[in-house]
């Protein structure tokens, strides 16, 4: 059942969604940028210390940061895009009804 929203309510809802999307995109941007910087600095320092390519990536201290921040980023994305997840749930019901109607004809 669809709700009837006023023009102002629809605007405020859209504005909130845009803020959520913008926040998520900035989160992704900062995740990539910070981890690239940390990764390059770590790799550069290790090469300057004379470590081999294998040793640089064998003991890489940045992995926990990438992993746990990545988990947080994943859940941030799930929260922002949860309405699209509902679309897939609704899709199953719509497809079932469509197939049932097709069988009746």
Image (cartoon, rainbow, N blue to C red):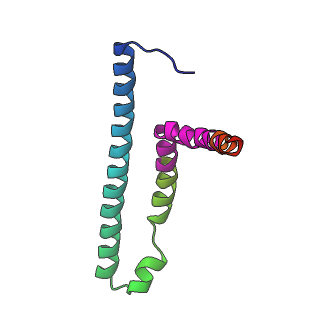
Left/right of residue 42 with respect to residue 2 in the rendered view: left
- Report whether 26 appears left or right of 96: left
Quadrant showing the N terminus: top right
User: On the rendered image, what quadrant is the C terminus found in?
Assistant: top right
Q: Is residue 5 left or right of residue 2?
A: left
Residue reaching furthest front? 105
Coordinates of residue 103 in the picture (x, y in percent): 70, 45
The structure residue drawn at horizontal position 30% and vertical position 68%, both measured from the top left corner, is 41
Vertical side of 86 occupied by 16: above or below: above
Q: In the image, residue 12 lies at what x, y percent? A: 36, 20
Q: Is residue 58 left or right of residue 16?
A: right
Q: Is residue 85 magenta?
A: yes
Give 31 or 59, whichever is nearer the viewer. 31
Q: Nearer the viewer, residue 92 or 69?
A: 92
Relative vertical location of residue 18 with respect to residue 103 in this rendering, above or below: above
At 30% from the left and 62% from the top, the residue drawn is 37
Specify the quadrant of the image occupied by residue 94: top right
Magenta residues (range): 73-95
Eyeballing the image, is 55 above or below 99? below
Q: Where is residue 5 shown, x and y percent of the image?
A: 43, 15
Q: Is residue 94 positioned above or below 49 on the image? A: above
User: Which corner quadrant of the image does residue 85 belong to?
Assistant: top right
Q: Is 9 colored magenta in this rendering?
A: no
Q: What secondary structure characterizes most of the magenta part?
A: helix
């Amino acid at each position: 059942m669809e709700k009837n929203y006023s023009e102002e309510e629809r605007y405020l809802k859209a504005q909130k969604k845009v803020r959520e999307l913008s926040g998520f995109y900035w989160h992704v941007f900062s995740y990539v940028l910070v981890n690239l910087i940390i990764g390059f600095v770590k790799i550069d320092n290790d090469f300057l210390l004379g470590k081999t390519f294998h040793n640089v990536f064998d003991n890489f201290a940045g992995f926990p940061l990438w992993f746990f921040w990545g988990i947080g980023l994943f859940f941030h994305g799930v929260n922002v895009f949860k309405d699209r997840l509902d679309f897939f749930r609704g899709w199953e019901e719509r497809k079932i009804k469509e197939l049932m109607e097709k069988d009746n004809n």
